[in-house]
Amino acid sequence: MIKRIISRIYKIIFNFTATNFSARDKLVLFETFNGKLPSDNPYAIYEELVKHVDKDDLYWGIKKANLKEARQQYPELNLVSRFSVKWLWIAARANFWIFNSRMPQWLKKNKGTIYIQTWHGTPMKKLGIDIEEISMPGTSTELYKKNFIFETNRWDYLITPNQYSKEIFKQAFQFKNEFLEIGYPRNDELVNNKQNDRLQKKLKKQIIGKETGRVILYAPTWRDDYFIKKGSYKFFMPFDLSKALSCLNEEDTLIIRPHYLVGESINITGYEDRVKVCINENINDLYLISDLLITDYSSVMFDFAILKRPMLFYPYDITHYKEKLRGFYFDYSKVPGPIAEDEKSFYDLLTQYCSGEIFSHLIEQVESFARIYTSWEQGVASKQVVELIEKSYK
């Protein structure tokens, strides 16, 4: 009861501030994934913006549980505890909000605040109002869609990575404001470093502790209905770690990059020397050191395509996922790599990859995929967003 009263008081203070005070020039609030560590498109924009403006005007909203780690990893950033009084004051008066996911519905946008929504991936699965039935706990399909549209109406700008995404966002988000057709800011470093062998060796040493062996990156999507309770999801490993590792060479390393909602539920006990769970590492650093990407329905395939490296697809629950959960926009038969339809074929394809027997004949398929989904990625998206911000200051 006390928490509810305090929460209500905070919301009243926030809404009063947003309504009765004008936005402060050059004050910018950044957030990624609702208060996770700085990353993704907002962080790429921040790194460019801080070259041009006073960093004292740039703030990061961080969940209280993540503040200690954020302060250790990013001591140079202005971090503020999400939903604290200070955060509410900054959010209410910021000249810009730069976020990559939806914000609470009660968060009132000051009439002088410009909301740049970066989003966080090229859509493969149904989004927003296109989802026929919502399986998430604590909401209904009707309420979810209503809240989604309310949120997207607040976005002044929406960054889109390709024409395919733009058409989907327009429908699924019912977005009627301005698209920024510039590619994703987070992908600038992929475009600019895909041939940087020196950097890739440095990152490999930093992340897995050695420069030898291949890196296999497993980056699956999350399942809306695989939860413990409201707001608490869990990770399901669709293959046996020992069998998967037996398909690789001794020097090879398997990196598991889970969705941020399920990362803490992974158990790799006994395999720590050959398996790494990378939750908070920059996903681009993982791409740059990886020789093979294994995924299912995750949009990571679209970003990884910039590197034009091999991919292996393991959609072990495709019938359930397609028919019961989200549904696809994308014709899954056109993914740029072989598809493992069951666990046995997964091990077979992984073995074949390691022996060099497959993937060479898929070069043109990968090239074609990259042309369609990465042509807007020119390595300058962050600069273009900063130019937009600077114009508003004048």
Image: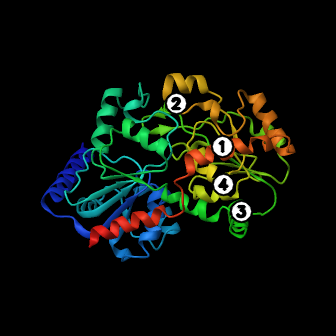
Q: Which residue is pictured at 62% across the width and 27% down the height?
A: 317
Circle 2: element type? loop
Task: Identify residue type, mark 4.
Answer: Leu
Q: Are marks 3 and 4 in contact (CB under 8 Å)?
A: no
Amino acid residing under circle 2: Phe
Q: CA distance from mark 3 to mark 1?
A: 23 Å
The amino acid sitting under disc 1 is Asn
Is tag 2's residue or tag 4's residue first in the polypeptide sequence?
Answer: 4
Say which quarter of the image contains residue 168.
top left
Secondary element at image label 4: helix
- Please state which of the two labelled residues, at mark 2 or mark 3, is closer to the viewer: 2
Q: CA distance from mark 3 to mark 4?
A: 16 Å
Q: Is disc 2 in contact with disc 4, using a CB cutoff of under 8 Å?
A: no
Dot 3 or dot 4, earlier in sequence:
3
Is 274 left or right of 96, judged from the image as shown? Answer: right
Q: Which residue is mark 1?
A: 267
Sequence-first disc among 1 and 4:
1
Tell me where residue 68 appears, x and y as whole percent. 47, 63
Mark 3, mark 1: which one is toward the viewer? Answer: 3
Tell me the colour scheme of the image: rainbow
Residue 8 in view: yes
Point 55% across, 43% down: residue: 299
**Residue 307 — which label?**
4
Q: Is residue 206 above or below residue 359?
A: below
How many angstroms separate mark 2 from mark 3 (CA)?
34 Å
Residue at image mark 3: 204
The answer to whether one can see residue 311 in this image is: no
| Inter-mark Cα distance, 1 to 2 | 30 Å
